[in-house]
Amino acid sequence: MENRDIVVVGLQPLDMEIGSNCVNIAYEFAKKNRVLYVNYAFDRTSLKREKNKPAVQKRLKMMKGKEDNLQQIQEGLWNLYPDIILESINWIPSTQAFRIANFINNKRFAGEIKKAIKRLGFKDFVLFNDSDMFRSFFLKELLKPICSIYYTRDNMLSVPYWKKHGQTLEPELMKKCDLVCANSTYLRDLAAEHNPNSFFVGQGCDVSAFNKDNIKVIPSDLLAIPEPRIGYIGALYTLRLDIEIISTIALSHPEWSVILIGPEDQHFKASHLHQLKNVHFLGLKDGAELPSYLAGFDVALNPQILNETTIGNYPRKIDEYLAMGKPTVATETKAMSIFAEHTYLAKSKEDYPGLIELALHENSTAKEQSRITFAQSHTWENSVQAIYQAIQKVKPQF
């Protein structure tokens, strides 16, 4: 798709400090199209809570007219900071009453977008909505795009804030959009229950830093730990990880060193894992150091716990593991099905030790290269190309 106008709305601002699918997609759109990226509009509660953050102070200056709230970021990409404050309405108990208040918020939000569209001269634009099921619920009716897309990349309804009214509104929003794009097969199948034009578009990942040929030195704190090293890198949160899987691995093979790298929640800090001699907590590391630590693993792990939050999420860390050629053992989920040929998938905690043994035994240079090639195919360019193909299936005139 080329020479189109695209309006992107979502849950993260363009200038957020951590990565975002929506931001990556917008930059890819902008390579051959004109893109207006709309930051979310603050509501009164969030503005009060975050008012001292630099990004919020910047927004307040714009609201006072000290800086233009429509800024060009690069050729083909503009960023809009909405010059409004929405009402905080999620406390409303009735979804029907919430719907009425939400329409008022949407109308004000749409008014800001319309002003930017007029300034930029956008015509016959595509509306791409990254999971903003509340603030952008009525934008199809209010903005009248030529094509409306809902993008789902997390099971938002597993979070109480979104579930309260979202269990009614998100299915309605999916149904009225022209198509739904999902970054996992699980989320695609959920969306298909509400909109038959639902497509799996994959996930882009920048794995350029995870190149084993660039690793010269393994960190000393990791080198001091005996091999074989079975490791996990990421947040150690019990919402996402199963402590019993890790314990089963460590207890079944005391000769293995289980390495855990990342910040711990209170449950991990209080867990019996800290009493096991072959479990090593190395703490939070700088992101630039992570490839060097991963290079020192013999097998990489993703011991996910199965719940509403994890079951459908695309696991980016698997791409990072595979990009380094590492044999990887992970909990089997529907979202992991696309990795089945390149990973070892465990259906239970008891499966993990045997699969790790197998991964250690049959690793080879050929298998490593196959994993690397597979991971490198998961680019934002390929993911956005899949979005374009989905649009063309639903809107052949594109």
Image: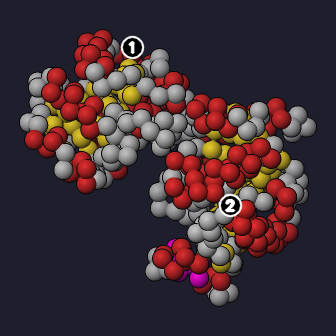
Q: Which mark is residue 318?
A: none
Residue 27 pos. (x, y %): 64, 51
Depth check: 295 or 167 in front? 167
- Frontmost of labels 1 and 2 is 2
Percent x, y for residue 104?
76, 72
- Numbered circle sitting on residue 366: 1
Taking the magenta stretch, the answer to whether it contains residue 377 is no
Residue topped by disc 2: 95
Residue under the point 55% across and 64% down:
15
Decide: few, some or many residues near mark 1? Use Cα within 10 Å; few <14, some 14-19, many ≥20: few
The stretch in magenta equals 55-60
Observer able to see residue 340: yes
Is residue 32 something that shows in the picture?
no
Q: Secondary structure at mark 1?
A: helix
Q: Residue furthest front?
A: 94
Residue 242, position in %: x, y? 31, 37
- Type of amino acid at the residue the image marks with label 1: Ala
Q: Residue furthest top?
A: 362
Mark 2, secondary structure of its residue: helix
* Residue 21 % position (x, y): 57, 48
In this view, the residue in front, 261 or 157, is: 157
Residue 59 located within the stretch drawn in magenta: yes
- Quadrant housing the C terminus: top right
Q: Earlier in the sequence, mark 1 or mark 2?
A: 2
Q: Mark 2 Cα within 10 Å, few/some/many (few <14, many 20+)?
A: some
Q: How is the image coloured?
A: secondary structure
Q: Quadrant of the N terminus?
A: top right
Question: Going by the image, does 11 lie left or right of 272?
Answer: right
**Real-space Cα separation, disc 1 to disc 2, in angstroms:** 55 Å
Q: What residue is drawn where x is 53% and y is 73%?
A: 46
